[in-house]
Image (cartoon, rainbow, N blue to C red):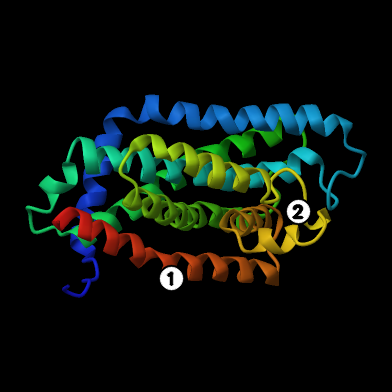
Amino acid sequence: MSSIRLPSPRGAFRVWQRSATIFRKYWKSIMFPNFVEPLLYLAALGLGLGAFIQQGGINGQSYIQYIAPGLLASNAMFAASFESTFNTFVKLKIDRIYDAIITTPVNAEDVVAGEYLWAGTRAALYGTGFLAMLAALGIGFGEPLITSVWAVFIPPMLLVIGMMFSVMGTLFTSLIKRIDLYAYYFTLVVTPLFLFSGIFFPVENFPSPVPTIAWFTPLYHAVNVCRDLATGPSAGTLVDVAWILVFTSVLALVPVQIMRRRLIS
């Protein structure tokens, strides 16, 4: 078996450019649901449940201030996850778009790298729009939801977070043969991450070993980074960023190799 070749920036960019061109035609209808869902959580939990939480909230923040940055991270996770699962499967198995692409000078490695970058870009676009909404809602509530100038670094961080979840989604996609198997991925991976990564409550309050397990999950660190940038970073923010970068870098080449085998077999 030939050794795996690293993606070329030019080839990966062409794959990204194709997805971006298509997205420009449909962005209005595609982006709307991704704004509504986190806003529903923000309203139902931040305002509804938050009214029952004692004064002082969590860590000196009101409950709505606490969950808002975490929803930014989860928004990036969902955007990248859907892009790297259902959309990627359709391109791979149903429309056979990747088969057509690799007949050009763009190779299999470029395809996967380009899809990582596009999923990250899409996550950053959704997250940035939601971040703007949070800033506007904070003015309307008279209670700022974003309180630090470091929040300007949230969009590029959402790009990285989106790429991380794209790697995870692409790995699952590279291993399955049927589209209905995504029910397992979203039920057993994405949903538990959404519920137990510190978006809605501090996982540190759970009995052992739940906090330790949570520390080794990707969304936990993504939530920490978004929350820290929204309120003011600390030294721990660097640890979370480093974890995300290492995790993504270590895992990224695995789907590349598996997808290459599927595309050239």
On screen, residue 168 versus residue 199, left or right, reads left
Residue beneath label 1, please?
250
What residue is drawn where x is 35% and y is 54%?
Answer: 116
Q: Amino acid at mark 2?
A: Val
Residue beneath label 2, please?
203
Q: Where is residue 226? Give x, y as percent.
A: 62, 53
Q: Where is residue 14? Give x, y as percent.
A: 19, 53
Q: Where is residue 200? Give x, y as percent.
A: 73, 43
Residue 127 in sight from this viewpoint: no
Q: Where's the N terminus, which quadrant?
A: bottom left
Q: Which mark is residue 86?
A: none
Q: Where is residue 129? Give x, y as percent.
A: 50, 38
Secondary structure under the numbered disc 1 in the rendered image: helix
What residue is drawn where x is 77% and y is 46%?
Answer: 201
On screen, residue 211 versus residue 83, left or right, reads right
Q: Where's the C terminus, which quadrant?
A: bottom left
Residue 185 in sight from this viewpoint: yes
Q: Amino acid at mark 1?
A: Val
Residue at the farthest right position: 55
Residue at the farthest top position: 29
